[in-house]
Image (tube, grey):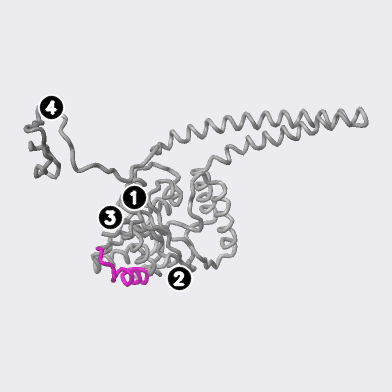
């Protein structure tokens, strides 16, 4: 089964049209499928429409949250509820086009365990966001300690192993594209053209997007903490240059001014060094608090033949023995 998780918040103008588009896209899929709509405390008629869809289409599962928990809260709830061997995450405003779903599933069937939908182009009516999104992805790509695919949001397919790994994490400020890259597994990319919203306005405020960007950078990069070491090095270099300039000063006033400046930069550098060391320890405390596992197992390869180790179970008449299946799926040792 393939599960499609869609967070919904005040999307009454789009729900019916969106579900029809998903049904059309999934008609040619041989796998069974379900759509888990997560109603994130909608105040319009979204929940009633979802219940109506659920009564008419057995593919629909409606998950009603107790209140509005935000975009990532709804996604997390949907990931825990989805039952499929593969789970697709997408937004319900047509910016993630349903016609891309078969391509994600085809890549999964070919062996990919995480299929990321990467935006080849982006239509955005809000000009400020259209300018800020590329800038954010460039900054994130430069700062991240992990190779996070750029121009990619939540729109993706994940195999059950990857979903279980994500569900095992207990992050309170999750950034899903970063967590998806962190768990690893075999990745594939599907490119698509991201459209503008079909109707209505975006539900994430500008402040919420700023917080989401900070979660992305703080959750997957220690470079801001280690910036203090860079500033310490720069301060020491400036201090040395000022100290050298004191030797060529033409007056006592100039020498004194350069000496004071040299001392200020040197003491400032020591402060940066102290902050950098403190930041390193804070980063390690942060790692311990998050409790991310040190590794995740993708496959365990074992031989189907398991030799008995007890000497009393092995008999070797006539100088030999044979290994035969014992009927339980394992192998036993039989005398030749």
Q: Which residue is mark 1?
A: 163
Q: Nearer the viewer, residue 155 or 313?
A: 313
Estimate the spatial distance between the alpha carbons at disc 4 and disc 3, rounded to whole Å: 43 Å
Instruction: Find residue 272 and report its image quarter.
Output: top right
What residue range appears in magenta?
Answer: 17-31
Q: Nearer the viewer, residue 309 or 252?
A: 309
Labelled disc at residue 198 = 2
- Where 259 falls versus 100 (above or below)? above
> Cβ–Cβ below 8 Å for labels 3 and 2?
no
The 10 Å Cα crowd at callout 1, few under 14, some 14 to 19, many 20 or more, is many
Q: Does any portion of residue 219 appear in the rendered image?
A: yes
Of the two numbered discs 4 and 1 in the rendering, the one whose residue sits closer to the viewer: 4
Q: Nearer the viewer, residue 17 or 156?
A: 156
Estimate the spatial distance between the alpha carbons at disc 3 and disc 1, rounded to whole Å: 9 Å
Estimate the spatial distance between the alpha carbons at disc 2 and disc 4, rounded to whole Å: 72 Å
Q: Which residue is mark 3?
A: 85
Work out which quarter of the rendered image holds the C terminus and state it: top left
Across and down, in percent, residue 253 comes to 90, 29
Estimate the spatial distance between the alpha carbons at disc 4 and disc 1, rounded to whole Å: 44 Å
The secondary element bearing badge 3 is classed as loop
**Mark 3 vs mark 1: which is more N-terminal?**
3
Residue located at (42% from left, 62% from top): 190
Across and down, in percent, residue 131 comes to 60, 61
**Mark 2 vs mark 1: which is more N-terminal?**
1
Instruction: Find residue 107 and report its image quarter.
Output: bottom left
Q: Which residue is mark 4?
A: 311
Estimate the spatial distance between the alpha carbons at disc 2 and disc 1, rounded to whole Å: 29 Å
Seen as rendered, the residue at the extreme front is 318
């Amino acid at each position: 089964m393939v599960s499609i998780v869609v967070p919904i918040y005040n999307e009454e103008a789009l729900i019916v049209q969106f579900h029809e588009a998903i049904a059309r896209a999934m008609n040619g899929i041989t796998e069974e499928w379900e759509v888990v709509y997560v109603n994130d405390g909608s105040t319009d008629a979204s929940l009633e429409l979802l219940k109506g869809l659920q009564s008419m289409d057995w593919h629909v599962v409606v998950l009603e949250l107790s209140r509005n928990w935000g975009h990532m809260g709804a996604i997390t709830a949907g990931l825990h509820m989805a039952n499929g061997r593969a789970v697709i995450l997408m937004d319900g405003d047509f910016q993630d086009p349903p016609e891309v779903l078969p391509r994600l599933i085809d890549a999964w069937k070919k062996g990919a365990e995480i299929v990321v939908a990467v935006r080849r182009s982006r239509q955005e009516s809000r000009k400020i966001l259209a300018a800020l999104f590329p800038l954010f992805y460039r900054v994130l790509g430069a700062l991240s300690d992990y190779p996070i695919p750029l121009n990619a949001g939540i729109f993706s397919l994940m195999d059950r192993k990857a979903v279980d790994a994500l569900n095992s994490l207990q992050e309170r400020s999750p950034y899903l594209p970063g967590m998806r890259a962190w768990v690893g597994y075999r990745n594939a990319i599907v490119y698509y053209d991201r459209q503008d919203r079909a109707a209505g306005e975006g539900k994430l405020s500008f402040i919420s997007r700023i917080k989401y960007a900070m979660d992305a950078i703080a959750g997957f990069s220690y470079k801001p903490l280690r910036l203090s070491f860079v500033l310490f090095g720069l301060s020491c270099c400036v201090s040395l240059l000022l100290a050298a300039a004191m030797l060529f000063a033409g007056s006592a006033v100039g020498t004194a001014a350069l000496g004071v400046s040299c001392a200020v930069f040197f003491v400032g550098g020591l402060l940066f060094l102290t902050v950098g060391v403190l930041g390193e320890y804070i980063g390690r405390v942060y790692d311990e608090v998050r409790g991310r596992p040190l590794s995740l197992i993708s496959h365990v390869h074992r031989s189907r033949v398991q030799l008995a180790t007890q000497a009393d179970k092995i008999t070797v008449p006539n100088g030999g023995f044979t290994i035969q299946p014992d009927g339980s799926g394992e192998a036993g040792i039989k005398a030749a």
